[in-house]
Amino acid sequence: MNPDEGIDEERGAGQKPWQEGPTDLRLVPLAGAAWAAAAWAVGTTGQWTAAGVGVCLAGALILLVRGQVRRRGGPGGGRGAAVPGATPGWRLRATAWAGVLLCAAAGAASAGLHAADLRRGPVPELAREYARARLEVVVTSDPRLTRPKVRGNAMAPVSIVLNGEVTRVERSDGSVHRTRTPVLLIVPSGEGREEWLRLLPSTRLRVGARLAPPLRPGESVAAVLKADGAGPPRIVGPPSALQRTAGDLRAGLREATEKLAPDARALLPGLVVGDTSRVGPELRAAFEATDLTHLLAVSGSNLTVVLLLLIGRPGRAQQVERGGLAPRIGLSLRVTALAGGGLTLAFVVVCRPDPSVLRAAACGLVALLAIGTGRRRSLIPALAAAVLVLVLYDPWLARSYGFLLSVLATGALLTIAPRWSEALRRRGVPGRAAEALGAALAAQAVCAPVVTVFAARVSLVAVPANLFAELAVAPATVCGFAALALAAVWMPAAEGLAWVAGWPAGWLARVARTGAALPGAELAWPGGWWGGLALALLTALVVLGARRLPYRGVAGALVAGVLLLVVVRPAPLARWVTGWPPPGWVFAMCQVGQGDATVLAAGGDSAVVVDAGPDPVPVDRCLRELGVRRVPLVVLTHFHADHVAGLPGVLRGRAVGAIQTTGLEEPPGQAAFVRRTAAAAGVPLIRAGPGERRRIGTLEWRVLWPWGGAGGGDAFGSAVEGPNDASVTLLVRTGGGLSLLLLGDLEPPAQRALLGVHPGLGPVDVLKVAHHGSAHQDPGLMRAVRPRLALVSAGRDNPYGHPSPRTLEALGAGGARVLRTDRDGAVAVVGAGRGLVAVPGGG
């Protein structure tokens, strides 16, 4: 009989389980030293790495030799000789420091060797020359699509990206080289896209490509390959049997989830096997805003859920009594460990070796080994061992934000969370609630500073969002994995389980969307390491202050109440505190970065929106702050991405009557995007007609441009040379007598033609300056309209120099007050005539 099992039988149900000694932290400094050294070494040259390794080894040798000399009493002395400082404690400290230096040397050496591999062979040389070559590449990751991004006025094309290893290089001179070099392969998304996306790891391809160096030093690839053309892949070797099996399981889960609701259909494959191909930008943004991205795709938490069923809660690892299904179905400790190890390895193969998955797998295997040998200790040594092994195996993990967040979150759950949970229990919080709240608070406290480093924001809804999401993670994961297993043998049963899993998966999406929709869901914070350090210090001060604060219950309730008000931001309270939006606003220019989005009040919660900016999130936030729930008309002045890519944000949760556009459908890809978005929302598309007049409530406007026959010739006139010159231009008048001229992105030739078609165009109160205040403006039009207020929409630190100082000087010389979103934030206009006021600072 296993000794542990005997103890289990003798232990009474009402007795307190035996606890092991204090947490064993001996491996933590060793893992930290290897991690820090690897992170440094992958970004430096070989000479510095060799020097660092030599210094560490020399230091470790000195410490060990001095420790031996002191223990023996010095040269020529006996063991019993009294030597100053020769205490057991000193020797232990010297040995410990020697171990730290040795692990640092190992981490740096591993990173140096891996980095040296990237600099050898023909691939780095060809990359430095930006040469073309024919290559054989073994796929080492799942293909993925890049996120659509707006660059300037265009949408960056979506590409297919995958990691691979070059095994054969054929140069343009016909010479052939054998090698093994990791690369990143980028393929244009076009014909053959589906065949590329179905590729499995271990597939061998033959590609023609131009090679380029990685964008940043310290990358884990030797080159970036930009494949020629966009046809289907040329496969010269099939994937391995193991990867085919994993691919079949993943494909079976996709098929089983095909009939689910859109959010569940997108989330469940990601939650179970890391397949995020169906997750759209809007859903991804909601998960990012609520700090739930660890649930968007498979992570270590999913493996934890599976192992919980087998071995019980992590806290039981400190106790002799076992939990989970294993003791209930009669599995011994060693069989339990073997079963858990098999599950862990299968999990990594099917879900792919993501940093979080690797960390969880290594930690799980160490813990299972401890269980199998009957020597269970705290999970902290298991986590430290996992970090040490993984960093030595793959040094680039040392620079992975995902790996860092995963380790920090796990460490917080194992060390901080139990203490905070116990403190909450002492204050009357029920056991389960205290455990969940302590875990959420601990994970957020240690992870938020790291998120701030690269995201420049803090989520104020992360803790409640994670608490609500936790209710659904286990059922979605368990039912999802069951559906994955059944899909290979009985698809109807798999579809049934997927339908059951779809309910908690849909709950996760609703939690993310609801949290992200709150006005104060996110707080802007300085990015970079200084911003992260500032947030870490602030968090530490808050924690220390909370421990010493008198009447902590009352103070905690007050803080929670204030935080709730900040997040919810009731409109009357927000207006009273911030002054935004000002009462009676008639026109607003939203802060959407390098793009345009303006709003005309049409009475009550109704408004006309002119352009939507480059991103759905800021325009949606702006409209929510303005209290706009109904949009009778959206006017898209032209089809450049910085004016139309945010259209889904305008449509989100609002009743929209119609979308009006210019007649020149260029660029065609972005015009097609507008048509697809409108069709998906069931909103009709109409075209702006020259001279067209419209009225909504007290708001009326006239379409001044494009004008048929302007300058003679085609439908738009010879002045129209591109999408900018085809911008819909509106002359707007409000019930209070305010006049506004909205120019879109008209260039000088079209501005002159506009004035020629409308020679009676006179002064206006407000001018939306064309093309983000660029230097290309027609002086004649500026003199004719003589605005009292000129508004410029431009992004902070944009690379185009918008707005141009020359344009700003010309507007100021004409008597206009100029406000710009890159410095003043969103701008609202109130009143008319002498009562005209511009209120900056919103958004």
Image: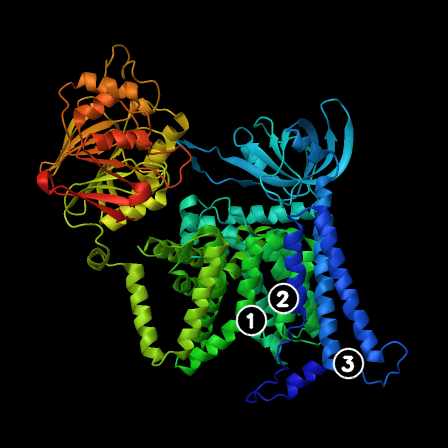
* Residue 496, image x, y percentages: 48, 55
Which amino acid type is shown beneath numbered disc 3? Ala
Whichever of labels 3 and 1 marks the residue nearer the N terminus, that label is 3
Mark 3 lies on a secondary structure that is loop
As measured in the structure, the alpha-carbon distance from the residue carrying label 3 to the one carrying label 1 is 36 Å
* Residue 57, image x, y percentages: 77, 61
* Residue 221, image x, y percentages: 65, 42
Residue occupied by mark 1: 414
Q: Residues within 10 Å of mark 1 (few under 14, many from 20)?
A: some
* Residue 350, image x, y percentages: 62, 52
Whether pointer 3 and pointer 1 mark residues with C-beta atoms closer than 8 Å, the reply is: no
Residue occupied by mark 3: 86
Q: Is residue 551 above or below residue 119?
A: below
Query: Is residue 305 visible in this depiction of the protein?
Result: no
Whether pointer 2 and pointer 1 mark residues with C-beta atoms closer than 8 Å, the reply is: yes
In front of the other: 299 or 322: 299
Q: Is residue 473 left or right of residue 76?
A: left
In front of the other: 589 or 502: 589
The nearer-to-camera label among 2 and 3 is 3
Q: Residues within 10 Å of mark 3 (few under 14, many from 20)?
A: some
Q: Is residue 749 left or right of residue 756?
A: right
